[in-house]
Image (cartoon, grey):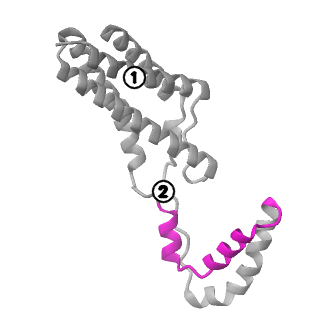
């Protein structure tokens, strides 16, 4: 059973590397950081607030039809936000987290595969549980990566385009990873050292 998990893990890793090669990850980041918008002084913001308040509902109405009450109230509240708050809302939660996840997901899978290979050869339960733990952690990081990319694609932020992956290949990689984690747990429980 450990050999079946090892082969399935290798298949999952192969599908993952093919995903990385065929994605636009290398082209997803802008070459140079975008220039920050010019600072807005408080007197100019105070004089243009009525104009902004009048244009915000009109812009929302022209984009998706009439704005909802909630959207209109939120736009009315946000027009008084200071520039520092607006910048803080638009900043990523953890700067550099995208690069960390892009490194941690494949690395965790490879290290877990090495531990599982050791478990397959020696049948030491500790190696099996370490391999399973790394597989589970790698799956969680991969799910997080997928969720962040899906949200970025929905937001369609032109300064930070989301990586594009083939949908069927993502589903295949995710399904194989889920099966690998489940079988790894079963094998680590069943095989005696």
Instruction: Pick the quarter of the image with the C terminus.
Output: top left
From the image, state whether disc 1 or disc 2 is nearer to you: 1
- Image quadrant assignment for residue 124: top left
Q: Which residues are magenta?
A: 64-91
Residue at (54% x, 35% y) in the render: 24
- The image shows residue 154, relative to residue 54, as above or below, that is above
Which is more N-terminal, label 2 or label 1?
A: 2
- State left or right for residue 59 relative to residue 174: right
- State left or right for residue 10 relative to residue 15: left
In this view, the residue in front, 129 or 23, is 129
In this view, the residue in front, 141 or 53, is 141
| Residue 137 at least partly seen | yes
Q: Secondary structure at mark 2?
A: loop
| x then y, percent, for residue 189 | 27, 19
- The image shows residue 165, relative to residue 64, as above or below, that is above
| x then y, percent, for residue 146 | 50, 39
- Predominant SS of the magenta segment: helix
| x then y, percent, for residue 117 | 26, 15
| x then y, percent, for residue 10 | 38, 15
Instruction: Pick the quarter of the image with the N terminus.
Output: top left
- State left or right for residue 93 relative to residue 129: right
Identify the disc placed on residue 182.
1
Identify the disc placed on residue 104.
none
- The image shows residue 21, relative to residue 142, as above or below, that is above
The residue wearing badge 2 is 33
Q: How many marks?
A: 2
Asked whether residue 125 is drawn in magenta, I would say no
Residue at (21% x, 15% y) in the render: 118
């Amino acid at each position: 059973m450990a050999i079946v998990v090892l082969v399935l893990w290798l298949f999952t890793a192969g599908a993952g590397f093919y995903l990385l090669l065929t994605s636009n990850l290398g082209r997803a980041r802008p070459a140079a950081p975008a220039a920050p918008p010019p600072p807005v002084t408080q007197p100019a913001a105070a004089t243009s607030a009525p104009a902004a308040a009048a244009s915000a509902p009109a812009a929302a109405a022209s984009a998706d039809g009439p704005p909802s009450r909630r959207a209109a109230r939120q736009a009315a509240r946000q027009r008084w936000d200071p520039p520092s708050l607006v910048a803080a809302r638009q900043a990523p939660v953890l700067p550099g987290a995208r690069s960390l996840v892009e490194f941690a997901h494949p690395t965790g899978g490879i290290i877990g595969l090495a531990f599982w290979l050791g478990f397959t050869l020696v049948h030491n339960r500790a190696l099996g549980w370490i391999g399973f733990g790394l597989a589970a952690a790698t799956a969680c990081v991969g799910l997080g990566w997928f969720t962040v990319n899906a949200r970025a694609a929905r937001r369609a932020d032109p300064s930070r385009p989301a990586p594009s992956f083939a949908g069927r290949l993502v589903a295949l990689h995710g399904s194989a990873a889920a099966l690998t984690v489940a079988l790894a747990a079963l094998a680590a429980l069943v095989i005696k050292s």
